[in-house]
Amino acid sequence: MKKKILVISGGISKERAISIDTGKQVAKELKKNNYSVKITEPDFKLLNIIKSFKPNFIFNALHGQFGEDGYIQTILETTGIPYTHSGVIPSAIAMDKELSKRIFIKNKILTPKYILYSFNKSKSYLIKLIEKRLKFPVVVKPINEGSSVNVFICTKKNIFKNIQLLTNYKNIIIEEFIPGREIQAAIIGSKKLGAIELQPKRKFYDYQAKYNTKAKTKHIIPVNLSRTNFDKIMNIALKAHKLIGCRGVTRSDFKYYKGKFYLLEINTQPGMTSLSLVPEIAAYKGINFIKLIELILNDAKSKK
């Protein structure tokens, strides 16, 4: 008899639409393969639904705040039911871009230089600090959003216009802009799944480039790297995955410039939509969608 799977999707983050799509795709594939599936929102009814449905596994298809920052994981821990993807602390660390960058730096993983900005400094102070520590252009982004939500590439001319759009955040990160190739590497469990290169038509691989089919981002697989460099990027991705304590599947985002790999961030809840990268990487390795889902579920089952 096939297992009962509860898929949690939706939520209230800026990535709600992507989460709903991920949840629908996962549920559809599970049902097609004779699993008993129920989809639910992470609302006040959640614990009652878990109690009545009695799932064997919970598939966390949430994205963004409250879904991949340790919040929902804390609630799911109380149920005793295996749930997918990373646990409480790894999720919180990975979602906090500043904290995860500190871990990367401490463990000699190359990542773009950055400063933390909290809106209480003058414009002239910030400009001087950027010119001293980073140089323009820079990347401005919230500490705790995913899917490149509210991420801007800024020059001295437009930085304050863009920063004004982020004043609802307590702190933001301003980091050096690394040009070069955009490469994403996926890990599942403790195994290296593979990598894919992206060539967006837009300035960078932002929210629209990720989820809008009209953006026409080019996906290149296999990635044109030497065996030595391919092994290097996969080893860095696995190292970051293990350092933070992740489980399930993760996707690490890199820039490759002048022979060096810069780790931008690690994503503990990569999308599972028709445009998502992890399913595409898996398919290239001969792992179809249901097998990928089952690998993620099996990793949840084996968690300590």
Image: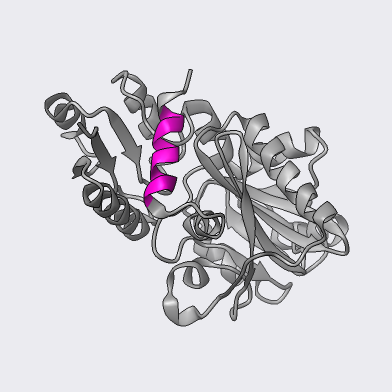
Tell me the residue at 36%/33% (across/down): 72
Q: Nearer the viewer, residue 262 or 12?
A: 262
Residue 291 painted magenta: yes
Tally of numbered discs: 0
Q: Give the residues in magenta.
A: 290-300
Tell me the residue at 59%/79% (across/down): 202
Quadrant of the image containing the N terminus: top left
Q: Would you say 115 lies left or right of 194 here?
A: right
Q: Would you say 45 lies left or right of 134 here?
A: left
Q: In x, y percent, where is residue 132?
A: 87, 57
Tell me the residue at 15%/34% (across/down): 45
Q: In x, y percent, where is residue 118?
A: 62, 48
Q: Nearer the viewer, residue 117 or 18?
A: 18
| Whether residue 118 is visible | no
Q: Quadrant of residue 141?
A: bottom right
Secondary structure mainly formed by the magenta segment: helix
Q: Above or below — where is 143 with respect to 203?
A: above
Q: In x, y percent, where is residue 276?
A: 47, 61
Q: Above or below — where is 48 with respect to 211?
A: above
Q: Above or below — where is 204 with respect to 144?
A: below
Tell me the residue at 33%/55% (across/down): 16
